[in-house]
Amino acid sequence: MLIVVGGPEGRPGQLEVSSSQAQRRGVVQEGVESGSWKSAHPAPSPGGHVLRVLTAPPPTDSPSTCLPTSRLKRSPLKVRFCTNESQKSRGDLVGLLRRLGFDISEGEVTAPAPATCLILKERGLRPHLLVHDGVRSEFDQIDTSNPNCVVIADAGESFSYHNMNKAFQVLMELENPVLLSLGKGRYYKETSGLLLDVGPYMKALEYACGIEAEVVGKPSPEFFKSALQEMGVEAHQAVMIGDDIVGDVGGAQRCGMRALQVRTGKYRMGLDDFL
Amino acid sequence: MLIVVGGPEGRPGQLEVSSSQAQRRGVVQEGVESGSWKSAHPAPSPGGHVLRVLTAPPPTDSPSTCLPTSRLKRSPLKVRFCTNESQKSRGDLVGLLRRLGFDISEGEVTAPAPATCLILKERGLRPHLLVHDGVRSEFDQIDTSNPNCVVIADAGESFSYHNMNKAFQVLMELENPVLLSLGKGRYYKETSGLLLDVGPYMKALEYACGIEAEVVGKPSPEFFKSALQEMGVEAHQAVMIGDDIVGDVGGAQRCGMRALQVRTGKYRMGLDDFL
């Protein structure tokens, strides 16, 4: 998950409050081994707004890792959480993070499921849902009868052969197959180890059907822009920090934001460096 | 599945014996609507060898569809079956086809599992197998302890989230991850409808790990060449016929063979035409 932090009073030095902890966990920045907060893009011009992003720890981490968030919330900076979480509703996600000590409200979260619902309504799309049961409630107000598209999210164990075939068959029956994917992350880290995210399954359906999915969530520029708009800052005023070199860092950079990668979470030396 | 037919005495007209039946089922050839056996490449020079390929019906088809095969087997042409079947061992596949009336022996089959075993032995690879139980016996002589590669085949219901994660985790633990895929077909047709083949799952692992799989089977040129070598004919002497525009037609053409696509099996108007 990504925590977006920013505001009109921001300047590059302000986030040093959390850098020592981040460095203990192994901060890595593009072109920088470690040791300082240095973005992949040039620093903003003097007086410019700064928007920053930090990775949040996974829910199983110690509550002490919430400290940077708390200190940022007490600063003049705006805080926003940009997540590709698609196994839980926003309410469940915020509830979990609050129990872990995070100072966060549902209104501060930019998540792909609500963004997808807006797209579905705007375009008159009725989805076949290949999603985790935990996020299904986000689609309660969506007509899913006689599907004319497929929505895929991080479905976890629901990524069975049977369910993948069903989604595939729905797409193949459509004259103009539409596949919406809530993110395209490659994998994430749980206590049990690395687990496949929605991206690989999105790629599987793309290949099987000869189509290209529409990604809702990071690294889609539209998703980053919606988070910036909700905060009232411009892309060049923002720095993003995440553990996913593609979804967090690459997506933010293509959107005109500065970006940092941390060596926490699913970061893997070598593989990400190569990318 | 693909039936390769050819031999030194072959000439283009000889296969007309089976064309009427093929036309009833809807033969399509590149650039030709229907009606005649015309390849996508120029005809071979007079006196040249001719190698031809027909699609076999799926095992559930009527035994009457075996007729073209029987007539070809009685001709001076050599016959070879090139298949990406990776749910069954060659023995089981041939047994099934014989019960359906096909005149076929195990020695006439070029299949990806035996070819993969040769590669594994040559390169000292110990695979983690993500394969269907029906083909596992082909790997009985292979050391699967302490895996240093992953072999993926059409695993059917074994393409569970758990099993996909296991294969992914094995690859991510390797310094130089090697993924061997028995074919890269997109889908195939069963009586229950279209089902995902190994290709989409290969693409999923490729994307998750940031690697490229080595494909054993159609459309790999090495696979077609091995079939040609086993028959003692050159690529330019061959015509291939299959229902998969990528695996059968495209692969054969890239290998220097002529190729025909039939409108049987999984052929789908529009999608394949676009490709």
Image (cartoon, coloured by chain):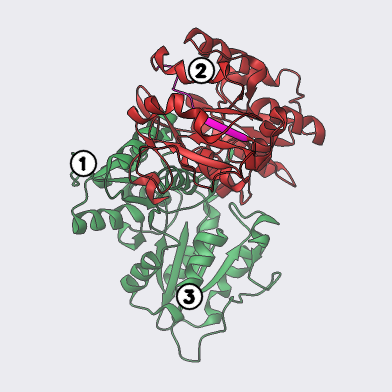
Chain colours: A red, B green
Label 3 neighbourhood size at 10 Å, few (<14), some (14-19), many (20+)? many
| Residue A192 shown left or right of residue A68 in the figure | left
Placement of the C terminus of chain B among the 4 image quadrants: bottom right
The lab-note entry on whether marks 1 and 2 share a chain reads no
Of the pair B117 and A253, the residue shown nearer to us: A253
Check the image and report above or below for A43 versus A262.
below
Residue at horizontal 45%, vertical 62%? B219
Could you tell me which secondary element the residue under label 2 belongs to?
helix
Of the pair B207 and A167, the residue shown nearer to us: B207
Letter of the chain that mark 1 sits on in the rendering: B
Q: Circle 2 is placed at which residue position?
A: A71
| Residue A28 shown left or right of residue B263 in the figure | left
Label 2 neighbourhood size at 10 Å, few (<14), some (14-19), many (20+)? some
Check the image and report above or below for B274 versus A166.
below
Distance CA(mark 2)–CA(mark 3): 68 Å
Q: Circle 3 is placed at which residue position?
A: B257
Identify the amino acid type marked 2: Arg
Q: Circle 1 is placed at which residue position?
A: B144
Q: Position of residue A134 (x, y in %)?
A: 57, 17
Q: Position of residue A58 (x, y in %)?
A: 44, 22
